[in-house]
Image (cartoon, rainbow, N blue to C red):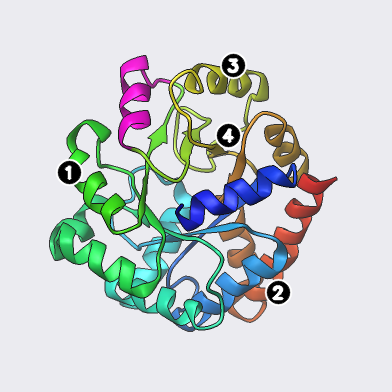
Amino acid sequence: MSKIAATFSALKAQHKTALVTFITAGDPAPELTVPLMHALVAGGADIIELGVPFSDPMAEGPVIQRACERALAHGVGIKDVFAYVAEFRKTNQTTPVVLMGYANPIERIGADAFIAQSQAAGADGAIVVDYPPEECEDFAAAMRAAGLDLIFLLAPTSTEQRIAQVAKVGGGFSYYVSLKGVTGAGNIDTVDVANRLSAIRKHVQLPVGVGFGIRDGATARAVAEVADAVVIGSRIIQEIETAGKDGAVAAVQAFTVSIRTALDA
């Protein structure tokens, strides 16, 4: 059982919804990445998505785009991301870490190198936004063989065929994008989400997380009624922007506590 699967299994036994939190590696400063990861865990996050900075993050709204720009301005790349995970693992061996990003950095170092370095650093999986599930069965199999989960996105527009393919090759959990748009672009229709998750679960046996548009405890709680996990990214990056470098760690932990409290209410 992968670390991600074990986490969901333990939470299910406790009748709890997983809280999956996202930050961009290197934002707002490289030396804050690992402290921010620990702050997320201290605040109640169950799984961390660590964004690999990329110059053309097509699925991201302006908030995460700015985070990528800040990280890239510091020269942060994929090898730095592996180093952050390895540093985090020195004191936390239990919280799953999922690397989230785009195909280009992986293609540049090579799929085999990406898998080997992810495993060596202590990562547990990856979300590669622009890897179509129909075209990366070999990569998914290689990830699985290394004990890593390849997590795929599903959208309101996903066909039954796409959902079935994700069920075939995906691992860890399936990530349902609740909006027809980019991250942080609007407000979630929880009734529509519930209907879509019912359709997804006809094919997908993995836990299903919901993200893109969860901005507060009330929305997180509503989504938790129908989802196995709540995923929050843009709203956390906004906390970092507002607090600045000096206050980022404390602000992120406080916000995460607020979401965890709402989920457990």
Badge 3 amino acid: Asn
Marks 3/2: CA–CA distance:
37 Å
Which residue occupies the foreground of this view, 3 or 215? 3
Marks 4/1: CA–CA distance:
35 Å
Badge 2 amino acid: Ala
Which residue occupies the foreground of this view, 227 or 10? 10
Q: Which mark is residue 186?
A: 4
Apparent side of residue 35 relative to residue 53 in the rendered image (left or right): right
Total labels: the figure holds 4
Q: Which region is colored magenta?
A: 157-169
| Residue 196 rendering spot, x and y as whole percentages | 54, 19
Q: Which numbered disc flags the more N-terminal residue, 1 or 3? A: 1
Residues packed near mark 3 inside 10 Å, few (<14), some (14 to 19) or many (20 plus): few
Apparent side of residue 2 relative to residue 189 in the rendered image (left or right): left
Tell me if I can see residue 73 in this picture: no
| Residue 172 rendering spot, x and y as whole percentages | 45, 46
Q: Which mark is residue 138?
A: 1
Residues packed near mark 2 inside 10 Å, few (<14), some (14 to 19) or many (20 plus): some
Q: Are marks 2 and 1 in contact (CB under 8 Å)?
A: no
Marks 1/3: CA–CA distance:
32 Å
User: What residue is disc 2 on?
Assistant: 250
Residue pictured at 29% horizontal, 59% vertical: 146
Q: Which mark is residue 195?
A: 3
Badge 4 amino acid: Gly
Residue pictured at 60% horizontal, 74% vertical: 38
| Residue 163 rendering spot, x and y as whole percentages | 38, 24
Q: Which numbered disc flags the more N-terminal residue, 4 or 2? A: 4
Which residue occupies the foreground of this view, 97 or 240? 97
Q: Secondary structure at mark 2?
A: helix
Badge 1 amino acid: Asp
Q: Secondary structure at mark 1?
A: helix
Question: Quadrant of the image for the C terminus?
Answer: top right
